[in-house]
Amino acid sequence: MIFAIASEDTEDVCTPLAWEGERPVAISGHSCAYATESIIPRYLAYLATAQVFQISKRKVAKGAKVIEVAPVDLARVEIPVPSLETRQKVVDILDRFDSLTASLIDGLPAEIEARNQQYEYCRDRLLDFPRKVGATRSMYCILDIGSMST
């Protein structure tokens, strides 16, 4: 696990990154890495965004303009560690939610555009009244937009 231990605000300090790669990775001086085989990295990453962790990190965060959490203080934050099976289930469920949310966010602009086009088509069809042969001008009116009040 890699944590950003410095930030401009308490919301972003301790932002997690679950490193699941095989290769070694380099981190900066404003990050810390925790290696443990007992915790699934994505479980810890999800947990680090949960309210219980957010409350705990605020207690150990220090600073005004730059907020920091010392690695030794971060290591003291207690986290729930249920059985391996339960942790894996949590990760699987949250991964599915993330995937669903991402697909919804990606699909929303296209869906909104399609609904706008559908609305415009229906509006135009509903308001397209054909002129009847022999209809008098009084059956139609010309809107004077300037005289309409809002």
Image (cartoon, grey):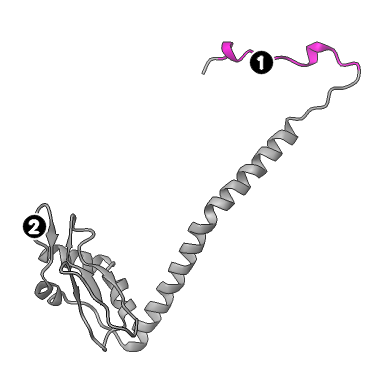
> How many numbered markers are drawn?
2
Image quarter of residue 129: top right
Q: Residues within 10 Å of mark 1 (few under 14, many from 20)?
A: few
Query: Start and end of the magenta stretch?
Result: 134-148
Q: Main secondary structure of the magenta part?
A: loop
Viewer-side label of 1, 2: 2
At 11% from the left edge and 52% from the top edge, which residue is drawn? 65
Which amino acid, by three-letter code, is at mark 2? Gly
The residue drawn where x is 57% and y is 52% is 110
Q: Which residue is mark 2?
A: 63
Answer with mark 1 or mark 2, whichever residue precedes in sequence.
Answer: 2
Q: Position of residue 41 (x, y in %)?
A: 31, 80
**Residue 74 pos. (x, y %):** 14, 73
Q: Is residue 40 above or below residue 109?
A: below
Tag 1: amino acid: Leu
Q: Residue at x 66, y 15 (%)?
A: 143
Element on which disc 1 rests: loop
Would residue 20 be counted in the magenta stretch?
no
Q: Give the residue number, with chain letter if any, for mark 1.
A: 143
Q: Residue at x 22, y 64 (%)?
A: 54
In the structure shown, which secondary structural element does the residue marked by tag 2 occupy? loop
